[in-house]
Amino acid sequence: MRATSSAFESSDDESDDDTFNQQCSAAFLVLVEEQAAHHTSRHRQPHRSYLTRRDLLQNPRMRTPFQQVLIGKVDRAYITTMGLDVTTFQRILRAGFQELWDSEPIPRTDTSASGEPRPTQRSLDAAGGLGLVLYWLNSTMLDKSLAQIFALVPSTITRYRDFGLDLLLRTLKSIPEGQIAWPHEEEFGVLSDLVVARHPLLQGAFGSVDGLNLPTATSSDERWQNAQYNGWLHGHFTSNVLVFSARGDLIHAAINAPGSWHDSRVSSAIYAKLEENTPEDFYLAADTAFPHNRNSIKTKIKTPVKSGTRTTREHLLFLDQLVSFRQSAEWGMRAIQGSFGRLRLPLDANDPAARRTLLETVFRLHQIRVRLVGINQLRNVYEPIWTETSEQKQVWGSLREMFFPDIRKADRVAKFHYIVVDED
């Protein structure tokens, strides 16, 4: 009996020793792995730029810099960071963006595309998703900066941004304020009256047109790289032609054309609008470089004359007002490029679909800013806001001198005009 008891005691001791050894081995392995991870992290740090979850605020839905702006509901802060005031932000959210955000799954390569969406499990709600897209469009900041503002790792930033950009474009297409449409027949006279109130000689002018070339990264495809190269500007660009009404909103946008295309090719749809949907005696103002040699549109696009052209004093006064009004297209371009910082960075050359989505979203957001937010230099100038008293006419004359002196100085062509004096 003692021998048996002794055998059991010996077996228990060996079992305890085995357990102890296993625990020591496990602890040793954990220690080695931690040391290896620390060593790897320490050596990667100077060479790699990335953020992990532990580097950011804990909850993306609470106390982040974006949430501070969102819950503050101050128009100034909203416009500074997202380009929209509080009311317009909520308008887009309720117009369809929130419903789409909550009802559609976010595309991922590691999950089923037909799976049920789980909006409550997402790091951002619909307001956060809309804010992320607007922050990105209105700035040139890198994803790591957005990661700190929204408390998301960069990979999640990219996935949410692409998803939200698509939803935003679909929402803007569905609301009246985001539409880009050619005027109806009765609207031409109204737009022309706005112009004539400031430029009496421009009877029939209803808008202005100009090209917008946006810098584009070089493509890995040699054919696309050649197509996007603009020899005049000596770089790679994406060409767009925009038509602004006297109210400052877009009435036509030809977008996402290769930079090597001539404006006449990009503007083919605009020519069709002028030929088929524009009454006689109404025209667009353009600069001298804009092609308008077609017989059917010669009277529907007017430009300053080139140097050496014989003209009369009366025609020269007309050209002076035409140059001043054509500046409205420059104001429109500046409103778009100045507001949407993303356009100041080279566009993606290898993804034309994503490039078009970006451009169309920006141009439709411009419509929203003009129509709802009220950020619109053209309307401020051309909307009649003074009565015809002599004192107020003098006010407009002073403002006109402030708005247009640089235009006259930059008009290097006018000083070369030949003036023909009538001998009668």
Image (cartoon, grey):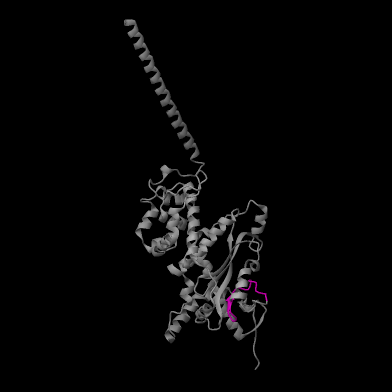
Residue at 53%, 58% (x, y): give it: 358
Residue 29 can be seen in this image: yes
Q: Nearer the viewer, residue 356 or 152?
A: 356
Q: Where is residue 355 in the image (x, y as percent from the top left)?
A: 56, 57
Q: Where is residue 342 in the image (x, y as percent from the top left)?
A: 51, 58
Q: Nearer the viewer, residue 374 or 125?
A: 125
| 292 sits to left or right of 178 | right
Q: Which of 41 and 171 is in front in this view?
A: 171
Q: Residue furthest left?
A: 2
| Secondary structure character of the magenta stretch overall | loop
Residue 346 can be seen in this image: no
Q: Position of residue 408 (x, y in %)?
A: 56, 76
Residue 208 figure quarter? bottom right
Q: Where 93 sits versus 4, above or below?
A: below
227 in the magenta segment: no
Q: Give the range drawn in magenta.
A: 278-294
| 251 sits to left or right of 258 | left
Q: Where 60 sits versus 42, above or below?
A: below
Q: Residue furthest bottom?
A: 424
Residue at 54%, 71% (x, y): give it: 244
Q: Which of 275 and 294 is in front in this view?
A: 275
Instruction: Give the quadrant of the C terminus.
Output: bottom right
Q: Where is residue 217 in the image (x, y as percent from the top left)?
A: 59, 55
How many numbered markers are drawn? 0
Instruction: Give the quadrant of the N terminus.
Output: top left
